[in-house]
Every structure is written in structure tokens, then in C-alpha cells.
Amino acid sequence: MIEALKQRVNDDEALVRRGRYLTTTFLLEVGRTAWLIAIFEGRIVSVTPGPFVMPSSAFALRASEEEWAKFWTSRPPPGSNDLMALIKRRVLRAEGDLQIFMANLRYFKEALAKLRPQETMQETLQGTAERGAA
């Protein structure tokens, strides 16, 4: 699933433009599985699965598989819908050089949300109509 991140982010020109000044490598841990994600000028250039002996990254985002699974649902529950909400609940640990993470927070929020199931416009409109009728 994480492998899809490269294509989904790179296909979103607005997101790539938002990250045009971002060049870094960060570690994403989903439970015991680690991924090194390299970004060059807003484009993801590689997604490398672990395990790693001594990974070199600017910062790391670590959470359990269960928490990431909630975050990556099409409509995450409150408290699981945002990276900062996960940090506030103390289920996501952000470690390392957090200046890079915080300076580009919106980029990382939108990039990691790209792993949520892709909803078609018809499904979105239908869901909006159903909520309006209730």
C-alpha cells in the first residue's frame, strides 16, 4: 500500500508545487514495518521498505498498524483524521528534526492522506446528499 504513495503524490501537481522547496528523507513506521521515503523538490523519488540497520532520515513518524489503518480509511474517525490529532492523542510519535516536518506540515498531511481509498466524485456527491437528507 505504501508503494502507491509515490505515484499518488507525484500525480497531484498542486501538492508537488506546494512541496517544491522540500527535499528530505523521512522514516515512516507502520507497526514494525519501516519505510524510507525520499522527496526531492516535492516529488517522491523513492519509497524503500525496511528493515534497515541504520536508516538515515531527517525525522520519523511512528504509529501502530491499527492507528495508521484508521487514518487511512476513506472517512477517518475524529482523532484519527489528521497527523496532529494522532500526535495529540499520543499514538503517533514524531521524532528527529521536526522543523522540516512542521515547516511542511500541510504537504505531509496531504501526502499521507493520499493513501486513503480514492473516492469518485459521484460517491462524494452521493455521500453529501445522504448527509443533507438526514
Image: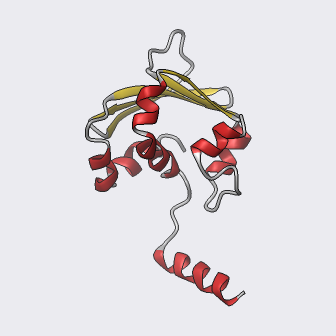
Q: Position of residue 113 (x, y in %)?
A: 52, 51
Which residue sits furthest top?
54
Which residue sits furthest bottom?
133
Quadrant of image for the N terminus:
top right
Q: Position of residue 92 (x, y in %)?
A: 65, 34
The residue at 46%/50% (across/down) is 110
The residue at 45%/19% (across/down) is 57
Residue 85 placement: quadrant: top right
Q: As displayed, is residue 36 above or below residue 18?
A: above
The residue at 26%/41% (across/down) is 20
Colour option used: secondary structure
Residue 32 placement: quadrant: top right
Q: Nearer the viewer, residue 72 or 83?
A: 83
Q: Position of residue 30 (x, y in %)?
A: 63, 33
Q: Nearer the viewer, residue 129 or 122?
A: 129
All told, the count of numbered labels is 0
Quadrant of image for the C terminus:
bottom right
Q: As displayed, is residue 131 above or below residue 81?
A: below
Q: Position of residue 86 (x, y in %)?
A: 66, 41
The residue at 56%/59% (across/down) is 117
